[in-house]
Image: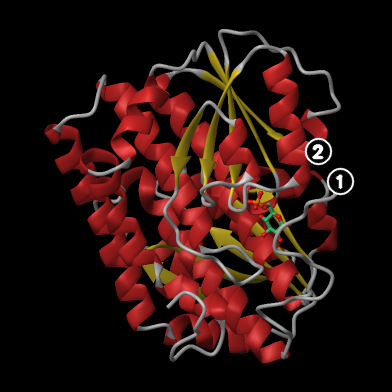
Amino acid sequence: DPASKGDFEHYMLKEIYEQPELIRSLTQYYFQGEGKESLEEATKLPMKAVNISACGTAFYAGLVIKDYIESKNRVRCFADIASEFRYRNPILDKEELAMFISQSGETADTLAAQSMCKEKGLKSLSIVNTEGSTLYRDCDVNLMIRAGVEIGVASTKAFTQQVLTGKTLSEVLAHGGIDDELRNTLASRYSLLAERVEQLLDNTKPIKDVADAIYKHKGFFYTGRGAYFPIAMEGALKLKEIAYVHAEGYASGELKHGPIALIDEEKVNVALVGEELFEKTVSNIQEIKARKGLIVSIGPKNRYELKEVSDHYIELDFEGLGDLAPLYVNVVNQLLAYYIAKNLGTDIDKPRNLAKSVTVE
Ligand code: G6P
């Protein structure tokens, strides 16, 4: 029952725990179920370039999707915050695609960005959770993320499903169509992600312990490279939203260009570390460590270099996950923000000053 918290203390936690099952259900829907037709239609849309607009968490999902589309499909992809995109007079042409990402399908700025693109003659594709929403009705093709009702104001499962829906589209485009071979490949890759997330959810103690150790700190810098950079921004957003503490997401290599001036023993660097550019990322962490920042690293397990440099090291099994690993790390961030907020006693499901859906400019 989506309206009940069940055994969970908060909707947010319940929604975090729904993720493995949702991750697993996506290939069935797109390869054998109702979603197949819209996925096929999506592949036929003009795509000389892709212009993504969205707000908040959906925007960060857009940045991860941009990374997938550019690296896998070699199609130029732009990602904008909808409230900027609609007013900056973007250069657009009819052979390009306009893509909109939204949980609610009712965010005012995202809707305005869509109607601007429509006026300029572009076809619109949504990646959306709410069937029948304004965005859903206004777009030419809709890819449903199938996350179910999301009640917690801080978006969790919708992010994961948005990214995976974009990933599915990118894979179908690269493969040249929808067939059993691709379904099997994606079904097993998504299942592996679901399995790892499940293992994480079965034992959250290491994350809780870190939250207990750091929740009184005065500022958090989440850092990452590549697809981990948007994950860093999303992780920082989760913490700001529900724990009301200052947090920023930064590209790992950028901290030294200013923010490092803020680092002292009261600040935390939550370092998201992928297999890619591992050595460089570790050396970025060392720069923060040298300024007495507290280091929480989230990265591949059994890495001596990470153990050495970290005050807390959340070890993950990345084996076989490839470019889905950032989604796995994102679930750690969701839990970390949740447990920090719980320690601080905030109103997790209805944080102050925030609305689930922002229907005004
Ligand atoms: C609000 C919510 C965020 C959400 C954003 C975009 O600010 O609090 O959690 O990411 O709107 O919402 P949408 O429904 O368009 O994804």
In the rendered structure, the answer to whether residue 92 lies left or right of residue 103 reads right
Kindly identify which residue carries mark 1.
Answer: 361
Disc 1 and disc 2 in contact, CB within 8 angstroms: yes
Q: Position of residue 342 (x, y in %)?
A: 64, 88
Task: Please state the horizontal and vertical placement of residue 226, each as a whole percent of the image.
Answer: 53, 40
Q: Quadrant of the N terminus?
A: bottom left
* Mark 1 crowd level (few <14, some 14–19, many ≥20, 10 Å Cα): few
Residue 293 seen anywhere in this rendered image of the structure? no
Is residue 323 depicted above or below 12 in this figure? Answer: above
Q: Is mark 2 within 8 Å of ligand 1?
A: no
Residue type indicated by callout 2: Ser
> What is the x, y in percent for residue 8?
48, 88
Tell me: residue 180, above or below residue 198.
above
Residue at (84% x, 70% y) in the render: 353
Q: Earlier in the sequence, mark 1 or mark 2?
A: 2
Label 2 packing within 10 angstroms: few (<14), some (14-19), many (20+): some
Q: Which residue is mark 2?
A: 83
Residue type at tag 1: Glu
* Residue 138 seen in this snapshot: yes
The residues bearing labels 1 and 2 have C-alpha atoms spaced at a distance of: 8 Å
Task: Say which of marks 1 and 2 sits in front.
Answer: 1
Q: Residue at x 54, y 64 (%)?
A: 156
> Picture coordinates of residue 242 (x, y %)?
70, 74
